[in-house]
Image (cartoon, grey):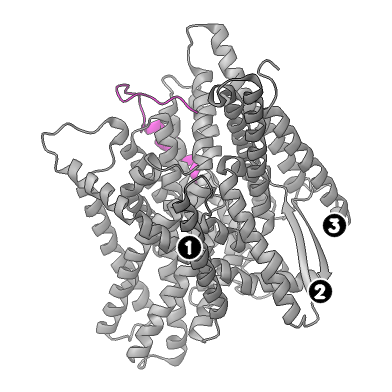
Amino acid sequence: MSHRIPDAVRLPELTLRGVLLGAAITLLFTASNVYLGLKVGLTFASAIPAAVISMAVLCRLPGANKLENNMVQTQASAAGTLSAIIFVLPGLLMIGYWQGFPFWQTSAICAIGGILGVLYTIPLRRVMVVQSDLPYPEGIAAAEILEVGSQATQRAESARESARREQTGAGEIALGAGVAAAFAFASGGLRLLAESISVWFAVGRSAVQLATGFSLALVGAGYLVGIVGGIAMLIGTLIAWGIAVPWLTAITPAAGQGLAAAGMALWSEKVRFIGAGTIGIAALWTLATLFKPMLQGIRASFGAMRGGTAARPPRREQDLPAGLLLGLAALLLVLLTLVFAHFLHQAAPTLAAAWLWTLTLGCVLFAGVFGFLIAAACGYMAGLVGSSSSPISGIGIVAVILVSLMLLGFGAVSDAFASLDPAIAQRLPTALALFVTSVILAVAAIANDNLQDLKTGYLVGATPWRQQVALMIGCVVGALVIPPVLSLLYHAYGFAGAMPRPGMDPSQALGAPQASLMTAIVRGVFDHDLEWGMLGIGLALGAMLIGVDELLRRRGGSARLPVLAVGIGIYLPPSIIMPLVIGAVIGWLIERRLRARARACGVELTTYAERPRRRGVLLASGLIVGESLVGVVLAGVIGLSGSPAPLALVGAGFAGTAKWLGLLIFVLVCLGFYRRVLRPHGA
């Protein structure tokens, strides 16, 4: 693992040049993430690419160090996470409420929600970062990259020792990054290799799918996650695709659809709600188990604030003061109240003032309290599977259902909308539910990112409060970038179901899949036709799995069943889950082989496995780096060209060959990873 800067050492961290560099990287990555998220429904974590770019720039300047680089990646990482706001906001155009993206309203929602996400997770740092054994795959990977970059720029006492350290560190990361970058470019750019493969077949009347994606970044993340999380996600995938989808396809008429289309439609429209229910109850259980240590963390923060003449905590334990946290949170909630009141007044100018403020305060209270709970749950999920794989849209589903039910309750006990125009009265609850959910999603996304960044900072020896300030700056910069980028893309392409001008080609519209799903869910709640049965099954399944996990915990040993990971396996497609599982299994096989070798040599496992384990972490980090950087570059090329595949060398007819060719090379890379980690020390 990385070398931690001691408390006594004072190095420049939050510098002006670092803030300006972080802002520039944030601009680039925010635009890329917004486009990719609207196009395919996925965003990439930008912390690792930001760390690489930061090192490349700052290493040419005097006095650069890894703590300054860490601040840059902390600030820029807001781009990959705050962009998740696009999973909700386009729904306001799809229902015809907005005709564009009002700059100040959109920016305010992004900035307020993002900064609240930072503030809410600060009291969780000790219990979830310092004291927890969660793997935080991207946080660890970023720390390793920062360490290698620091080694490469330091003046060592021995030139030979410096060269050796750089080779064993930077060389492994460069190898992993080069392989992943080449694969990602050949698949996402040239289209010579497929990005996934799936095989459908019928068992009686049931449709069964075997599938995997070829993401080497996810393989690296799975290696860092470990076998326990990997097996739990595999169980979720088996529940979804081995039980739920086959059963539903057997009892549901196909309505003229093919096998694959029918299976995917049932998974998307029904089975994912089982996953959302499981995630929801697992998140609540996680909050319950974390409640006591979370209170202890908050009490410790207040104790430090009231310490007076008592000794200050060490530099690496200094969070923002508790009084400042409360003051900022209160100010942000007041600003959020004004934003919601303006939103409601614009939507329904004739709404009685009493009802306007009742609805406003109810929505702010819900967003503030539920956002705090979601922040803790999302921080845990990010620690378990990483920010890239954390199901933010699943959290959004839970949030939008609860918000809609709250508003439905308002409608059931009052005639607040009775005096409004019927068209406004029908559209207003849906628009308000989406608007409130967008705040919660911003909180959840940044909570995901903040704890991951704080893990990186903890490993390298950064000062927590400076990281927290850097991430707030990143939230503000990202919030100023997102509205114009959204408006530009909307007027250039349009969204599915929301075209800005007549005569535009619907086939070129951006799908915005999560926003479409969120909008459909809200309408389902208000029209009373939501898939409550599937949500109930997910809740029951989650409760049963929690019982199993508690039984395993009480029996002792290392066997556990992380229920959140099972829910993630149900909710996310196998093209994302299976590479994570493969990476976890590779790590498990490597660990078994290392144990066998240590026993054969008669030495302690810790001593024998130190170098191979570090090599594995570095290679896995390189895989994440390489694919992430190519994702940024390809997003820029796609955005500039306006074509979904501007670099493709082959046409649609090559797709079948690309699948099997991609599978072959993917398997070879995984085997090469296994052998590289286990190679003899001198090889």
Q: Measure the alpha-carbon separation of dots 2 and 3.
A: 19 Å
Task: Name the residue beneath numbered marker 3.
Answer: 652
Q: Quadrant of the C terminus?
A: top right
Q: Secondary structure under badge 1?
A: helix
Three-letter code for the amino acid on which mark 3 is drawn: Ala
Identify the residue at horizontal 37%, vertical 41% (top origin). 131
Identify the residue at horizontal 69%, vertical 38% (top origin). 180
Mark toward the start of the polypeptide (2 vs 3): 2
Q: Measure the alpha-carbon separation of dots 1 and 2.
A: 39 Å
> Is residue 617 located in the magenta-colored stretch of the structure?
no
Q: Is residue 359 above or below residue 25?
A: below
Q: Is residue 382 left or right of residue 130?
A: right
Three-letter code for the amino acid on which mark 2 is drawn: Gly
Query: Which class describes the residues within 10 Å of circle 3: few (<14), some (14-19), or many (20+)?
Result: few
Q: Measure the alpha-carbon separation of dots 1 and 3.
A: 48 Å
Where is residue 174? Give x, y as percent: 64, 28
Q: Is residue 52 above or below residue 209?
A: above
Task: Name the residue beneath numbered marker 1.
Answer: 547
Identify the residue at horizontal 44%, vertical 53% (top origin). 554
Three-letter code for the amino acid on which mark 1 is drawn: Gly
> Is residue 15 located in the magenta-colored stretch of the structure?
yes
